[in-house]
Amino acid sequence: MEYILIIISAIFVNNVVLMKFLGVCPFFGVSKQVGTAVGMSGAVVFVMTVATIVTFILQKYVLDVFEIQYMQTITFILVIASLVQLVEIILKKVSPSLFQALGIFLPLITTNCAVLGVALLAVKPVYDYDLLQATVYAVASAIGFGLAMVIFAGLREHMELQDIPKGMKGVPIAFVVAGLLALAFMGFSGIA
Amino acid sequence: MSKLKIFTRGFFSENAVFVMLLGLCPTLGTTTSAVNGLGMGIATTFVLVMSNIVVSLVKSQIPDKVRIPSFIVIIASFVTIVELTMQAYVPDLFEVLGLYIPLIVVNCLILGRAEAFASKNKVSDSILDGLGMGLGFTMALMMLGAVREILGSGSIFNISIYEGDGALVFVLAPGAFIVLGYLIALTNILTKKS
Amino acid sequence: MSKLIVSPSPHQLGSNSVKKLMYGVLFALIPTLFVSVFFFGLGAIIVILSAVISSVLFEYLITKFILKRESTVMDGSAALTGLLLAFNLPSNLPIWLVIIGAFVAIGIGKMSFGGLGNNPFNPALVGRVFLLISWPVQMTTWPKPSPFTEKMLGYTDVTTGATPLGQLAETMRNGESMSSLGEKVPDYMQMLIGNMGGSFGEIAGFALIIGLIYMLMKKIITWHIPVSIIGSVAIFTGILWLADPVNFADPLFHILTGGILLGAIFMATDYVTSPMSKRGMIIYGIGIGVLTIVIRIWGAFPEGVSFAILIMNALVPLINMYLKPKRFGEKVKKLK
Amino acid sequence: MASKKKSSFINMVVVLFIVSAIAATALAFVYQATKDPIKQAKLEKDKKAVGIVVPKFNNDPVSESDTLIIGERDQLIFFPAKMDNKLVGVAIKTYSDIGFTERIKIMVGFTPDGKIFKTAVLEHKETPGLGDKMQKNKGNWSEQFTNLDVPNIQDTDDDGILIEVKNDQGTIDAITAATISSRAFCDACERAYNAFKKIEK
Amino acid sequence: MLKTFPKGGVHPPENKLSANKKIEILPVPKQVSVPVSQHIGVPAKVTVNKKDVVKVGQIIAESGGFISANIHSPVSGTVFKIDEVTDTSGYKRQSVIINVNDDEWDEKIDRSEELIKDFDISSEEIIKKIQNAGIVGLGGATFPTHVKLMPPKGTKPEVLIINGVECEPYLTSDHILMLEKGEEMLVGIQILMKALKVDKAYIGIENNKPDAITHLTKLVKFYKGIVVTPVKVQYPQGGEKQLIKAVINREVPSGGLPIAVGAVVHNVGTAYAVYEAVQKNKPLFERVVTITGKSVKNPGNYLVRFGTAVSDLIEAAGGVPKNTGKIISGGPMMGKALNTTDVPVAKGTSGILIMPEEESKRRVIKPCIRCAKCVDVCPMGLEPFLLMTFGEKAMHKSMEKEDVLDCIECGSCSYACPSDRPILDYIRLGKNRVGAVIRARSTK
Amino acid sequence: MNEVITATIITVSSVGVVAAVILYWASQKFKVFEDPRIDKVEEILPAANCGGCGYPGCRNFAEVCVKSDSLDDLFCPVGGNGCMSSVAKVLGREVSEKDKMTAVIRCNGAPQFRKKTTHFDGALNCTIQSDLYAGETACQYGCVGLGECADACDFNALHMDPITELPVVTEANCTGCNACVVACPKDIIELRPAGKKSRRIFVSCINEDRGGAAKKACAVACTGCTLCFKECEYDAIVIENFLAYIDPLKCVLCRKCVQVCPTGAIWEVNLPPRKAKPAKETDKKPEEKKEVDLIKTAKENITENKTVDNKQDKKNKTE
Amino acid sequence: MKQVKQIIHPGIIKSISGNELQVSIIAQAACASCTLKGACSVSEVEEKIIDIYVENPDDYKNGESIEVYFKQSLGFRALFLGYVLPFLILIVSLISLMSVTKKELLSGIISLLMLIPYYLILYYSKDKIKKTFVFSIKKSFNYSSFRF
Ligand SMILES: Cc1cc2nc3c(=O)[nH]c(=O)nc-3n(C[C@H](O)[C@H](O)[C@H](O)COP(=O)(O)O)c2cc1C
Ligand SMILES: Cc1cc2nc3c(=O)[nH]c(=O)nc-3n(C[C@H](O)[C@H](O)[C@H](O)COP(=O)(O)O)c2cc1C
Ligand SMILES: Cc1cc2nc3c(=O)[nH]c(=O)nc-3n(C[C@H](O)[C@H](O)[C@H](O)COP(=O)(O)O)c2cc1C
Ligand SMILES: Cc1cc2nc3c(=O)[nH]c(=O)nc-3n(C[C@H](O)[C@H](O)[C@H](O)CO)c2cc1C
Ligand code: SF4
Ligand code: SF4
Ligand code: SF4
Ligand code: SF4
Ligand code: FES
């Protein structure tokens, strides 16, 4: 039950992009096509999970032990930046053709803000998560990110075909759509 | 490029928020009021200027391949400094801005300026660039914060300007997106006309 | 003989028009209008008038001065948006809030996207949800229905009461059993004719169904969306109720209360924001039904139709992308 | 871009090591320098809150504070306020987790007879415009708690809880449209009151 | 329930003004201009020269390839010239212009009215005869009939379906043909069956022609293997894919031919032409044409020689009415608007419809309200609104993905659209481009 | 040193070094050699991404420029010769000068010369109309005037003249990108060398009908009367299918043909005004003279660059 | 003839070696137009080169623009192998280890290490994978220049 609550809360109620404003740049940048949005979500789930597990261990068994919590930002960002690269290198090394296939399927997989943000949130003292809860939280957040992104990509593909007034075309209308999407997601608030 | 232009383009032609759409998370997340926007903007500006200075100083000592990680370390250090200082001297603001302070690290604006400008230019120019970009960012955040505060809480800089409740949405997440959308539309229209 | 006209086929056009459809829906709303005025009197009239007039006016002003296009107010869609927005409000809402709601509905919800046909979200609901979140207090104080009394002439100082759904939420929050709810809310017959609290357009179940029948007969809408919404609500709440009748209300209660009927018949069916294929419509309807109940039972809001419709509106492009109508001739059937 | 260094494995490792080391050192010093001010700032907040919620005193309640353990995990800090060594009130830092979002932390001050003197909100993440009306500067809702005579509240529904909103058969008017926050606030006060009773003993 | 296709379709007002008008024979005009391209496929090659004397039924242009058809002289006289004349396509095409002199028929043609039921020739001979007679589909597409009778390798025809649906409003030429020449047509069907080596034929007739249904049902008892199948009045019931689905419940696959499901579809007029070609040696040089329209004085059905100017035909029906807006060759749903009345009647001309001005004008285009009416009525299960948007934005690749080539151009979508959007115009545009690209790809 | 400082330095440095190793590895694995000249070439290119060069975008063109051995077949019509020579400079290669090309409109048939016989009422799109039939006039070759070409032009070099209902090229903006040529379903538009000082002479008609028919359909059509052909001393004019065509490479701009053309189908652009030759004018019958005047005024209308936003115009028509 | 959903990318032939074409994919993502792409920290900016096997390499020349076709289902399969499957391994091992050992640190590290055998397996089956993920190409067509 506790896990279900974490999942629902992270996906719907406190959606990372729509409610918590994490990873807004890729949310707007990579959401022009549904296909890529779906692909990206899959990758984000993996990266976010791995990143959260690693940073969680780092936090709890290094930073907390030595009482240097204030080094959180700098260690987390280094770990995350290299992790993302590591994943790609391994993939490329291990299976070049798989890597190529992903290459044309996905535009990019880094979402610094969201990954770092979720990693930071997962170790937040108020939540007091253990590793499993933190991981579940990360996975759910990533799914929430992916969900918002896929829905938004659908809306934007649709908007491409519509007759949007000149001044609103492109980015402005995308923001308004995102706003209305967030408005709709407010309906989930309080589910707990 | 003239010094003036280096300084001013961050305000208008290359404004991080309205034109280049960088650093959207803090932009949206911290602008529930003008003051919060201002605070976030200043924190970001500080990191931006300082990291620009340092990057510009050490640029020739750093091998190409570790450029990015080095920059990240430099930026992250300044972010931590900001974090610690704010905790010590403006704890209330720090609490409101919360998560977004550490997230300054990943604001593409900062890494972007370090990479695209400071790593290629003199220290003095880098300071100007950082200051211009940072203040442009601050201005944008303040504007967004001000609009949201006026519409959402009926006040500006915590000074009440009309009676009664504002439209709550503007303080909440949807309002952030919507207001920014219209502000961008407005800048588009204004810049196209002039 | 004057110049011959040449054009590609077809040379004959049907008799449908946007205007006809929109006025058809307006006509179908008339019974509801009467019922709401019957129960809420002057308040209903004031809110309706201010919503419709300001919607039409905003659309006119925006097309004329901002978009600089031909005015489109005569097609009736703005009036319809206004009327449906009004039906979603409490009858004692201050006029300035109604006007803001109309502005948001038309300005943000519709004209920002280029007007009729371009908006991804239902404008009236955008207006309503905007109001609901911005001014939750005003938006959740419901006047008591008061047929045939002089109170009908009151607008601001009428007695307020709770909606059945508010009672439901309260009951569930307090962990009381459903039988205690039964004492607090009107019986189903009363609900069907509209004698209960709530937004003044949503109460009149019977009148709304008349509207549905009219629209189905006139082929303005098809059955898919309303039926799948109501059906999925009935099934979902039915399962919960059968499993645990003490803690969950019965399906009929859920269908008759709140905005399910208004939403299913008039709001979810909005052409612009609903899917294009029949299969899509059914999925869309099921989504709305299930989300509504989820929000009602587990969410912070006592009512969830508006949110459910908006959320499914957001999914419509995806539905359209993946649930295409069945193409002719995809599979070959062998003759026996 | 005249003299970019060539990348070799060694110099990369060395450079990054140096950069990290310098950064770490610098940070460590900043940390050292800000450590005390941060602690101070935190104490200051408590101090200020304590100053608000209990009658005039002339000791240093913060330095005399103590932790009270209730149940398994619950820990509340209380601050005795003394006027000329005579106890004039106790401030209790309490919290509630049943709010709309995350934990609400408040400071509740009691006079020795168990009455609430005043309350102060320390931290909350409730919705601006709704739940945040519990803050003093956003509305006068919390005035209800000033001088609330808790021991003499009638427990109408006999559930043993004294501080409750009217919806739960209590005495407190909830914030309009924010019953949940109000309930959480009451919950925190109740917790503090229970702690107070424990201290009394 | 009556048979019909499963999805889509519209029911425009039928307006069969000329329904009970007997076939009249239009007098031979003074001059005819016979286009050499009256069919789908390669144009025929002219075989006569200026000043040559020709008889009725004599070949004047020879088939130019496999998918092509012979053209016979519809009149007797001398070839005046060979020139470019505007035809129903709206463009100038090569035509043979003949000055009429008398009405002298080729002697091989049997001009008697007598019904000849029996035939005893092989399938190959039938096809040869049909090919020589220049018969093309008279249902509108003018596809050379002999090609359809020679199924490609690997396919086997199982049933013959005769299209007597005539779902277009106004038109009645097939209807009257079924009434007056029913028996001849049935013999024609038997010939076609033999040619295809099938033993089953269905005649699909829309339910709004009860007299034709009863008449033919009575007659088919004497003809083995032929069944009359009444179908629901629903445009475009006459589209061959729809008709096949309605009659034998098989769906022609996307991009496939009817033969893929073992069916071959012919129009009733074609069947009659086959009868005349095989039993009477009469090539295709005249056909029944409906002339109709609400403002037309005498709507009627005329037997017209090809090459006759449309203006002559209109004259026979009482002249061009005042306030004429549009003159359409064919029905209102699929017909082609003419830019002049000086075009010749050709093999594909099933009717001439005259529309008054107020009915001819299109209405103001409004934005799409996504009402899905077009999706509902599309018999092919396409999404016309989407195709139109892609067309407007020149997103041809997306159109290809959305199966634009499946569109049968029935126009139901444009008809149903409440916003009066010219959906089919843009779909056609897209079909053109996409079709061309696909061909270019496959030839590479 | 203090414990915290030690811990800090150790953790951060070790994380830093690990990151360095990983990123170094990454950079090794992901090394893609991108010729730095590609960037430079791209910078020179106009960034119109119009595809006029035959490649999907400017960057692709830049890549091809860098990779291929000679620049002979490569030309960016938008940047023109200047741009190509800068590219050549960057790459240290030769570039052959290409004449500037510009679009010319080979239809002269303003409504006063080409009577409309029908009214087109379909979707306002040239291709849709020309797929349907020959057009509103008796000339089946001429411009249908719905401006698909102007829509296709990305450089604001084409607009529809509301009076002549024909497209007008603004030569200064035209980059010769070929987009309009591709767009026009009637093949009205031809890319021709702009000529010295932008002077050029061409036949503004593509009607291949016999003289009489052509003339009947359009008063300013080329009837294939061969007068110009006979007049031309440089063999620059060929007549095929009753239509004259002036070879831009052979034409020396003597403009004799212009004067002899009885219908005014030959255009001269940017040539200085000629001295009046009253003798020839009076030769003509009064009626014809009137017609020539008419043509002249019409031409003035045509050549005058009215900058009307034709898209706006079209919008109005649609609504 | 039912069409398979395809991902289509425009690309340019970079080089040809034997039957293999090296094709560079033109970025379509937001990055392509982003002004800061040069400054972006991570790997998305470099161009993507893929190898494509063709029967008739003589038909193609360097620098030619083509369209790369890739079955969408294959894209999802790649996604599954590259990200989703290791993710599942990670999660499953984490959950099971946590419930068995109750030791966070140990379970976390072991489940991360579980990825190593996964990638090893992937490494040893790379030839098979190569056969699965095939691209096909078609020459580019400009639709607007084609008509009847
Ligand atoms: C976006 C949103 C934010 C809300 N924030 C709060 C809040 O901070 N505190 C609160 O008590 N209720 C909040 N609510 C309202 C509660 O969910 C719930 O509707 C309300 O407390 C019911 O109480 P009432 O009986 O006072 O209306 C919020 C609702 C929404 C939709
Ligand atoms: C290129 C082409 C080839 C065709 N080949 C055959 C064929 O081999 N057999 C056949 O029965 N019909 C063939 N058809 C005829 C069509 O299936 C169809 O009957 C004809 O186009 C008329 O149909 P309609 O009037 O419904 O459009 C062919 C049509 C086309 C366009
Ligand atoms: C929308 C549509 C409607 C059609 N309606 C008829 C019709 O009413 N009667 C008819 O004989 N053919 C009609 N056709 C043509 C048939 O599809 C088919 O081409 C014809 O029956 C084949 O016979 P034929 O080759 O003998 O002409 C229609 C075609 C289409 C696409
Ligand atoms: C059946 C039907 C239902 C409609 N429902 C709504 C509605 O719920 N809200 C609304 O704003 N407009 C509604 N409209 C009107 C119109 O579609 C709407 O204003 C468009 O969404 C504006 O682009 C409806 C129209 C029809 C025909
Ligand atoms: S899309 Fe084609 S097949 Fe479908 S209704 Fe329109 S014209 Fe008919
Ligand atoms: S019928 Fe017309 S308005 Fe309705 S969806 Fe189709 S194109 Fe749009
Ligand atoms: S006029 Fe034609 S050739 Fe010239 S720039 Fe425009 S589209 Fe290109
Ligand atoms: S030149 Fe061609 S494209 Fe341009 S308006 Fe004329 S017909 Fe249309
Ligand atoms: S600031 Fe760009 S993703 Fe968060």
Image (tube, rainbow, N blue to C red):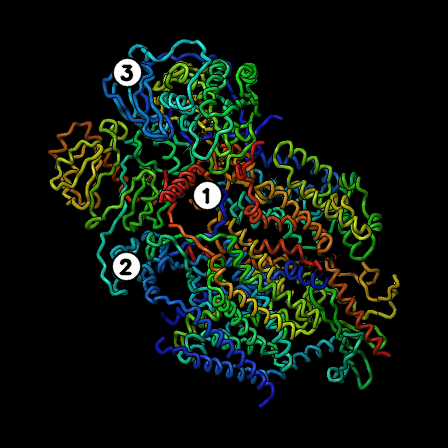
Q: Can residue B150 be seen from the camera position used here?
A: no
Which corner quadrant holds the N terminus of chain E?
A: top right
Q: Is mark 2 within 8 Å of ligand 7?
A: no
Residue under pointer 3: E54
Q: Position of residue F283 (x, y in %)?
A: 12, 30
- Nearer the observer, disc 1 or disc 2? 1
Residue E96 falls left or right of residue E356:
left
- Where on the picture, by quarter, is residue B172? bottom right
Residue D145 falls left or right of residue E75:
right
- Whether C209 is drawn above or below B33: the answer is above
Q: What SS does tag 3 mark? A: strand
User: Subunit of mark 3?
Assistant: E
Q: CA distance from mark 3 to mark 1?
A: 49 Å
- Where on the picture, by quarter, is residue A50? bottom right
- Whether E15 is drawn above or below D194: the answer is above
Q: Residue at x 23, y 53 (%)?
A: F98
User: Subunit of mark 2?
Assistant: F
Q: Nearer the viewer, residue A110 or D189?
A: A110
Residue C49, numbered circle: none
Q: Residue at x 70, y 58 (%)?
A: A191
- Nearer the observer, disc 3 or disc 1? 3
- Where on the picture, by quarter, is residue F289? top left
The residue type indicated by label 3 comes to: Val
The residue type indicated by label 1 comes to: Met
Q: What SS does tag 1 mark? A: helix
The residue type indicated by label 2 comes to: Cys
Q: CA distance from mark 3 to mark 2?
A: 67 Å
Residue under pointer 1: E399
Q: CA distance from mark 1 to mark 2?
A: 37 Å
- Nearer the observer, disc 3 or disc 2? 3
Residue F83, numbered circle: 2
